[in-house]
Image (cartoon, helix red, strand yellow):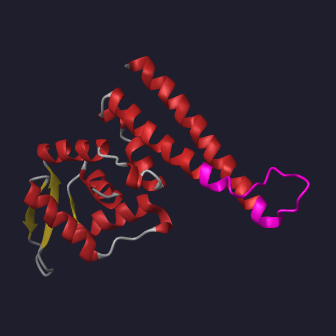
């Protein structure tokens, strides 16, 4: 499952909505960085209906076209939980995929949360190793702005690893 699918189900978690409202709330969650086109939105909603994750009913409004109102089912909540737990290494480099899962840690067992954190930590560690080809710590050499960018990214990644370690400590206290 993708981040977009997680966001769509997140939007439906507490309130029934029609497609346009789902799209607007989801885009607000994405921020300015992403939008959902109607083809993607309705393909996801159709897929979720086939899976039994959502149901829909037609809303008739006089003088306007009919529209569908979508509702997340209990099975949808189970599917959503499974989507959060499903975190393969292939997507662990995506900030969106990671943050979407961390936001819903209260819904899953601490051991599963720890697994997600471990997968992300491995991805970040690998990223730092790949950055190490740029030896920006050689202070005798002028690395210019390239070195500044690499150093900044390394600092961000190291800060996230520290944050992950604090989350791990918190979760281990609950396990």
Q: Main secondary structure of the magenta part?
A: loop
At 49% from the left and 68% from the top, the residue drawn is 32
Q: Quadrant of residue 54?
A: bottom left
Q: Which residues are magenta?
A: 129-147
**Along the horizontal axis of the image, is 51 left or right of 82?**
left
Q: Is residue 60 above or below residue 151?
A: below
126 falls in the magenta region: no
Q: Residue 84 at x, y = what percent?
A: 31, 44
Nearer to the camera, 21 or 1: 1
Q: Is residue 66 above or below residue 134?
A: below
At 29% from the left and 65% from the top, the residue drawn is 21
**Along the horizontal axis of the image, is 85 left or right of 117?**
left
Residue at the outermost right position: 140
131 falls in the magenta region: yes
Q: Is residue 33 visible?
A: yes
Q: Residue 103 at x, y = what percent?
A: 41, 42
Q: Residue 122 at x, y = what percent?
A: 49, 42
At 25% from the left and 76% from the top, the residue drawn is 39
Q: Residue 24 at x, y = what percent?
A: 35, 66
Q: Which quadrant would the C terminus be assigned to in this image?
A: top left
At 58% from the left and 39% from the top, the residue drawn is 161
Q: Quadrant of residue 141?
A: bottom right
**Along the horizontal axis of the image, is 71 left or right of 39?**
left
């Amino acid at each position: 499952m993708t981040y977009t699918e997680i966001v769509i189900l997140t939007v439906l978690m507490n309130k029934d909505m029609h497609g346009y409202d789902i799209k607007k709330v989801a885009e607000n969650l994405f921020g300015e960085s992403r939008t959902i086109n109607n083809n993607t939105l309705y393909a996801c909603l159709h897929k979720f209906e086939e899976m039994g994750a959502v149901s829909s009913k037609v809303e008739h409004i006089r003088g306007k076209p009919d529209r569908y109102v979508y509702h997340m089912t209990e099975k949808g909540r189970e599917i959503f939980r499974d989507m959060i737990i499903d975190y393969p290494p292939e997507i662990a480099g995506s900030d969106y995929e990671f943050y979407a899962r961390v936001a819903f840690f209260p819904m899953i067992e601490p051991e599963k949360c720890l697994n997600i954190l471990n997968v992300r930590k491995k991805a970040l560690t690998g990223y730092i190793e790949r950055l190490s080809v740029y030896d920006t710590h050689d202070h005798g050499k002028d690395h210019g702005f390239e070195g500044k960018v690499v150093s900044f990214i390394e600092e961000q990644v190291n800060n996230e690893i520290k944050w992950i370690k604090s989350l791990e400590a918190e979760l281990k206290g609950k396990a």
